[in-house]
Amino acid sequence: MTTSYYADPRPDVQGLMRAPGARILDVGCGAGALRAAGASYLAGVELEPRAAAAAREVVDALVEGSILDCPLPFAQGEFDWLVFADVLEHLPDPDRALERCLPYLAQGGHVVVSVPNMRFYLVLLRLIADRWAYTDSGVRDRTHLRIFTRRSLHAMLARHGLQIERLHRNFRLIEDQSQIGRVGALATHVARATIARALPDLMAFQYVALARRR
């Protein structure tokens, strides 16, 4: 993964949060880009050494290691927000990660989770055409250990007593939009306004969910 991946401020994630003045635990915090959201206290957990080193310069507390087994020096109910942005799909046991972190969530606190959508239409077309192959990024990222759909995301959160309050879909027309140009951007805009309204889950490249305890 590129350096820019770990430094992405994720405006789609921030858009679901009320971060200013809040206490946030960012699991898979990358280089700590969520600092820009304005939290009064930001703690991070990061496995990748270079990203962890960068995050240590900007977050208030940094735990380097895997969320599945690293020591977590936090107090019960310490955080207003738990953030898992593009993290759970990389873990062999996403439920374990949620199980470990939820005790640190305050009463009335929220959880934000983003995961890729395996029902993205181009992934389905590749399966139908027997053209499946792993890639270095995107839904078919070779480092993904777990797959998600809208239904399975709901089910996972429900297992931990979490109910989705808002579900944002990141729509795409193609998987890699880094060099689509103006024509591609226009085509994507048109597709969002037409196809995505009729088939929202098939054009959703990624889900971003805002959840809280039921």
Image: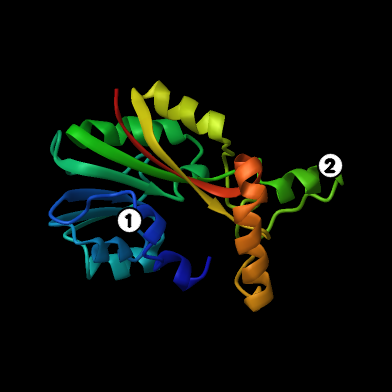
- Taking depth in this image into account, of 136 and 157 the one nearest to the observer is 157
Instruction: Tell me residue 110's x, y (percent).
Output: 27, 38
Determine the image quadrant of residue 68: top left
* Residue at 14% from the left image edge and 33% from the top image edge: 76
Contact between labelled residues 2 and 1, with CB atoms less than 8 Å apart: no
Mark 2 neighbour class, 10 Å CA radius: few under 14, some 14 to 19, many 20 or more: few
Amino acid carrying label 2: it is Ile
* Above/below status of 17 relative to 3: above
* Above/below status of 107 relative to 12: above
Residue occupied by mark 2: 128
Which element is circle 1 on? helix
* Residue at 71% from the left image edge and 46% from the top image edge: 121
Instruction: Tell me residue 128's x, y (percent).
Output: 84, 42
Distance from disc 1 to disc 2, alpha carbons, whole Å, reads: 36 Å
Determine the image quadrant of residue 113: top left
Q: Is residue 160 left or right of residue 207?
A: left
- Taking depth in this image into account, of 127 and 187 the one nearest to the observer is 187
Which element is circle 2 on? helix
* Residue at 15% from the left image edge and 34% from the top image edge: 77
Residue occupied by mark 1: 14
Instruction: Tell me residue 70's x, y (percent).
Output: 31, 44
- From this viewpoint, is residue 199 visible? no
- From this viewpoint, is residue 125 visible? yes
Amino acid carrying label 1: it is Gln
* Above/below status of 31 relative to 112: below
Q: Is residue 61 left or right of residue 31?
A: left
Q: Is residue 184 left or right of residue 116?
A: right
- Taking depth in this image into account, of 191 and 151 the one nearest to the observer is 191
**Quadrant of the snapshot with the C terminus:** top left
